[in-house]
Amino acid sequence: MLALYAVLIVGAFALVFYLGRRSQHKYDALAKCLSDRGVKMYGAWWCPHCQEQKEEFGAAYEYLPYIECGIKGDPKGRSQVCIDADVHRFPTWQFPPTGERHEGTMSLEALSDKSGCPLP
């Protein structure tokens, strides 16, 4: 009887883990599509809105076309790539081919509409 309980408990944990991982990656395709289409997100490590935007993507954040503008330890410093791109507010989304920009967070629906990348 103890063995049966152990199997049920392990099975329950496996199911929760699987469902949790599956939901964390539901935006992989969107993040990859944004990257493939040349969309860029400029952000800074100290920016709370940038963190919120990243959290919307969950684990798919790793595929997001993110460019770090902040310099660790210097909240006012900006990386050279962001100076060259003339980025002043975070997050800033840049959309090719025109280079049109949106300053501030964007809903996933708005990113999908603007980029043509489908939502799951």
Image (tube, rainbow, N blue to C red):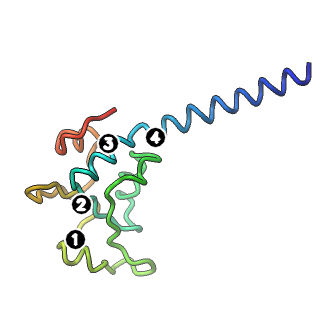
Q: Residues within 10 Å of mark 2 (few under 14, many from 20)?
A: many
Count the marks.
4
Instruction: Please name the residue that numbered disc 4 is placed on.
Output: 25
Local secondary structure at mark 4: loop
In the drawing, does residue 96 fall left or right of residue 43? left
Quick one: quadrant of the N terminus? top right
Q: Earlier in the sequence, mark 1 or mark 3?
A: 3
Residue closer to the observer: 116 or 77: 116
Tag 2–tag 1 contact (CB < 8 Å): yes
Which residue is found at the position 44% from the left and 77% from the top? 72
What kind of residue is marked 1?
Answer: His
Q: Nearer the viewer, mark 1 or mark 3?
A: 3
33 in relation to 70, above or below: above
Q: Which mark is residue 30?
A: 3
Q: Residues within 10 Å of mark 4 (few under 14, many from 20)?
A: some
Instruction: Please name the residue that numbered disc 2 is placed on.
Output: 92
Q: Nearer the viewer, mark 3 or mark 2?
A: 3
Task: Find the distance from the CA under tag 2 to the CA under tag 1.
Answer: 8 Å
Tag 3–tag 2 contact (CB < 8 Å): no
Q: Which mark is residue 88?
A: 1
What kind of residue is marked 3?
Answer: Leu
